[in-house]
Amino acid sequence: MPAIRRPRRHRWVLLLLAALGAVVLYRVAREPRPAEQGVQVPAGEETVTARVIASAVAVADAAHETGRPHTRQAFAKAHACVRATVSVLDVEPRLRQGLFARRADYRAWIRFSSGDARVRSDQMRDARGLALKLTGVPGRKLLEGEEDAPTQDFVLADAPRFFVADVAAYALYAEAMAHGGDNGFFFGGGSWNPQRWRLRELYLDTRARRAPPRSLLQTDYFSQTPYRLGPSLYVKYAARPCERKRPARQDRTDDVLRRELEEELQQSDGCLELAVQPQVPGRNMPVEDATVLWSESDSPFVPVARVTIPRQSFASAEQDRFCEALSFTPWHALPEHEPVGGINRLRRAVYRELSRYRHARNHAPLAEPRGWCLDLSGGPCPEEPSAAPTPRPAPKPKATPTPIPAPAPEAPAEEAAPPPPEQAPPPEQAPPPLHLESRRH
């Protein structure tokens, strides 16, 4: 039987649609034109921020399940809260600011989470978050009313950039979410006019929703937004595995990420590398547009600290309650690490108000931890020594050996194996077993 041949005009239609799709994809995926690198605060930003807070509270209320505690408005599902030690490295002089001014060890908490406002199955495509809280950090902090808090937070997610550029765009997104879903934001309130669609934001949001990773410890996390590092430098942060592994996927259950992390930390320590990406003058690395990816070819990430997660058991109801009582915000920070850009200014107000709202509804204390104990009373941890940072001396320079005359040639021997790489000092033994406040930070 002869093959059915398509009319040529159908082929031209298909080619035209394919070309149109390629053009659209190119336009939504390309980076915006280079913008100013410094801080620029638009007029009326505070008024827009108030609209976002009202919308975020409405989203949190809609996601609340009767009879259960009130959860965060984003990154609601916590997979685990684990103890860690953050060891500041000996960094280059221009990076020796604030927390990274000297080598020291800090006790810390890490909250691993998923991005949706509802607690859902791990099998759903979603963003994943890592919130790191160092304790025992001296110095005045930036957050009003918590200037004396002894903590420093880093709030990260597994996408390298945010899905909207500024506060005005996020306000439209939050209002759409408060009225039932994000399609109203991406497609202009249901308009058939493509000029009202936000295809770039849709593209970035879709890329940020991923299948569950094989391991939370083998995932890269990013700050997405920039921060000061001292008086004259802007940076972005990342946390990456110290060693790349590919663990086998064990099952496809609703809480697989928690179970896999528990098994990993029963077998060995976890390790992440905290790094900074300095802004380079003249490159497309703006402060105010959070959708622009800072190119690693222009500025590679530089390690500044090692995060060691000792072997531990974290799956207890008491520790889960402690984890959900914690508040994470990038404004728990020393002035040398001030968050910058519109999205970070938005977080300052929104995170604070949502945290207060959640704690009030749950009748929970709003306080910062003092160490590794499960206590938010404000006092020192009773069962452990002070959680103040432990200074570590800088490594001594290696002595230059006295040259030794070469011996007479002999039969060739095998090359000596290179010395093993220097290992980070082992973390202190953790006490007995024992977090982000937004959907997209």
Image (tube, rainbow, N blue to C red):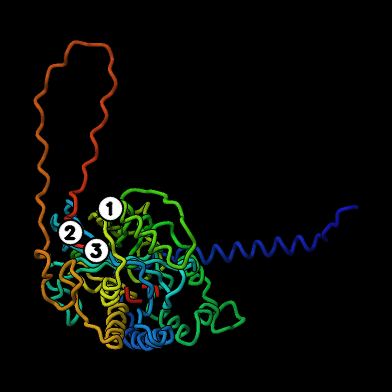
| Nearer to us in this view, 219 or 380 | 380
Callout 2 amino acid: Phe
Residue 211 in the image: above or below residue 189? above
Residue 269: give its label. Answer: 1
**For discs 2 and 1, the disc positioned in front in the rendered view:** 1
Cα distance between the residues tagged 3 and 2: 29 Å
On screen, 30 above or below 397? below
Q: Residue at x 36, y 67 (%)?
A: 79
Decide which of tag 2 and tag 1 comes sooner along the chain.
2
* Residue under the point 23% across and 11% down: 410
Say which element carries label 3.
loop
What is the count of numbered marks?
Answer: 3
Distance (Cα) linking label 3 and label 1: 14 Å
Q: Residue at x 42, y 51 (%)?
A: 247
x%, y% of residue 348?
27, 78
Labels 3, 1: front one = 3
Residue 372 percent location from the top left of the image: 18, 66
The answer to whether marks 2 and 1 mark residues whose Cβ atoms lie closer than 8 Å is: no
Q: Amino acid at mark 3?
A: Pro
Q: Residues within 10 Å of mark 3 (few under 14, many from 20)?
A: some
Per the image, the residue denoted by label 2 is 100
Work out whether mark 3 precedes mark 2 in sequence or the reverse, and give the earlier one. 2
Q: Earlier in the sequence, mark 3 or mark 1?
A: 1
